[in-house]
Amino acid sequence: MNDNVLIIDFGSQFTQLIARRVREMNVYCEIHPYNNLPDNIENFKAVILSGSPFSAMGNDAPSIDLNLFRKRVPLLGICFGAQYLAHNLGGKIESSEVREYGRAKLNKIFHNSSLFKDINIGSQVWMSHGDTIFQLPENFELIASTEDVENAAFKIKDEETYGIQFHPEVSHSLDGAKLLKNFVIEIAKCEQTWTPDSFVESSITNLKNELGNDIVVLGLSGGVDSTVAAILLHKAIGKNLHCIFVDNGLLRKNEFNEVLESYKHMGLNIVGVDASKEFLSALEGISDPEAKRKAIGKTFIDIFDREAQRIKDVKWLAQGTIYPDVIESVSVKGPSATIKSHHNVGGLPDYMKLKIVEPLRLLFKDEVREVGTALDIDANILNRHPFPGPGLAIRILGDITEDKIKIIQEVDDIYIKHLRESGCYEKIWQAGAILLPINSVGVMGDERTYERVVALRAVSSIDGMTADWVQIPYEILAKISNDIINKVKGVNRVVYDISSKPPSTIEWE
């Protein structure tokens, strides 16, 4: 691919959104940390510099060699990226006494600029910066201003290098997608060839070449990612793919049998393994969420290795890793630093002696679903809400016991059934119930109770990188709460989580 866009991440919380906007144009792009640039820089047709929580004037400011890109490919600096360009090329940056954050309107646009083609004066943009470009270098030309920010956008004379002090990637910048398209399509001339069908075609070809006649083992979870990965691999290598579905005892109610049943008609080699007691034993007495993840990961690897050894001549382990997993697991100085460890990112113990193949590691979640549709996978599977790899262990705050698992399974089952029956399920990106480590006083049958509290969570999102809480109608929430308290012994209070990501995460742990 020679129509790639390279996005250099300086630690902005919005970097992933830049990538999403570029992918929506059917143009392939990659995010790389500023301190770990790819070896194949010459393959990229355009470069975007992200924002950052750091000041371009600071001694600890992230830095790159701008000569790698300037005058070779079109370059766009966003927020910090723009300030970095100006500061390093002779401009003057100053700290604002008042942080410029929120909505603003463009009050000057120089329409000879290709970057602002078809964008009108008065267009709303989103500012989020503490520093501002006070004076542009001599060879820079001003191309847009807002009422409060004179140097809102610039171009370097005689080269396709641009800078903007606002964030076009966020939805609050109403013509932001148009501006990015002007840069990527009109200025950089990238071809719009990144489609689900093209991904399927190229992936199958590449997998055939990479894997040949080797035997591959894959841990199925019943979720969207592992299912799409399995079908993609199945189309490439057929019966050489062996799938293992491990019941860790932390799945949703009846999920183990239901998932195995759903795969019967897909032609996959699949074996189900009930290891729930082993996982429960490994989690005994553990309350820390990261310790839970590690205990589950280790136990899974041990069991998976044991089962994989029953299959002769296995050389590869396939995983359903997707791009947000990769991004969040790469430590970058700033808010996009590692948030949590991912169960399917990283290496394996040396004793497993398997190479890793990750056919979906370039895709965001919504792209995985689009690829699944191109592969003719059942919509009931593709439209399932994401479910955390560690399962209900991270939806039970505190230590894990068999009783707690049964409680949250029953609560979750009632919650999801109501969402389906009310027609809300398809409108929600992810929903789940969380068992809180507190009890509350209640009254049942004229008697005082002191029982558990559960929190319900439902969010809307595109790819899980950002999310808003869903305003489920009160009457539906009332029915759900009433049903849970009446039917699940040990629960006497239900609360609803109304926080968004950021600042919160989708899961509580």
Image (tube, rainbow, N blue to C red):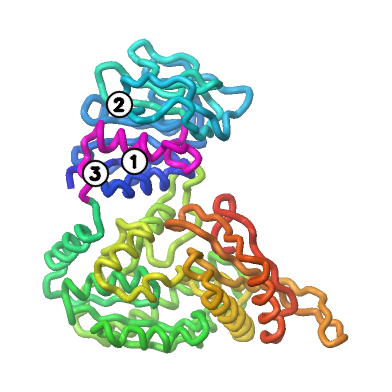
Relative to 239, is 169 above or below?
A: above
Q: Are marks 1 and 3 in contact (CB under 8 Å)?
A: no
In the drawing, does residue 490 fall left or right of residue 466?
Answer: right
Name the disc covering residue 4, or none.
Answer: 3
Which label sits in the foreground, 2 or 3?
2
Q: Are marks 2 and 3 in contact (CB under 8 Å)?
A: no
Q: Of residues 170 and 138, which is closer to you in this image?
A: 170
Marks 2 and 1 sit apart, C-alpha to C-alpha, by 20 Å
What is the crowding at mark 3: few (fewer than 14 residues within 10 Å), some, or many (at least 20)? Answer: many
Q: Residue at x 33, y 49 (%)?
A: 24
Q: Position of residue 298 (x, y in %)?
A: 44, 73
Say which label, 2 or 3, has the lower sequence index: 3
Q: Of residues 22 and 290, which is closer to you in this image?
A: 22
Q: Of residues 428 and 137, which is closer to you in this image?
A: 428
Disc 2 target residue: 114
Disc 1 target residue: 7
In the drawing, does residue 370 fall left or right of residue 343?
Answer: left
Q: Position of residue 319 (x, y in %)?
A: 32, 69
Relative to 426, is 82 above or below?
A: above
- Give the amino acid at mark 2: Ser
- Give the amino acid at mark 1: Ile
Marks 2 and 3 sit apart, C-alpha to C-alpha, by 20 Å
Does the magenta-highlighted stretch encompass residue 221? Answer: no
Q: Residue at x 53, y 34 (%)?
A: 128
In the drawing, does residue 84 fall left or right of residue 472?
Answer: left
Q: Residue at x 69, y 73 (%)?
A: 478
Relative to 508, is 100 above or below?
A: above
Does the magenta-highlighted stretch encompass residue 170? Answer: yes
- Could you say whether the residue bearing mark 3 is in a helix, strand or loop? strand
Dividing the picture into quarters, in which one does residue 137 lie? Answer: top left
Residues in magenta?
Answer: 166-193
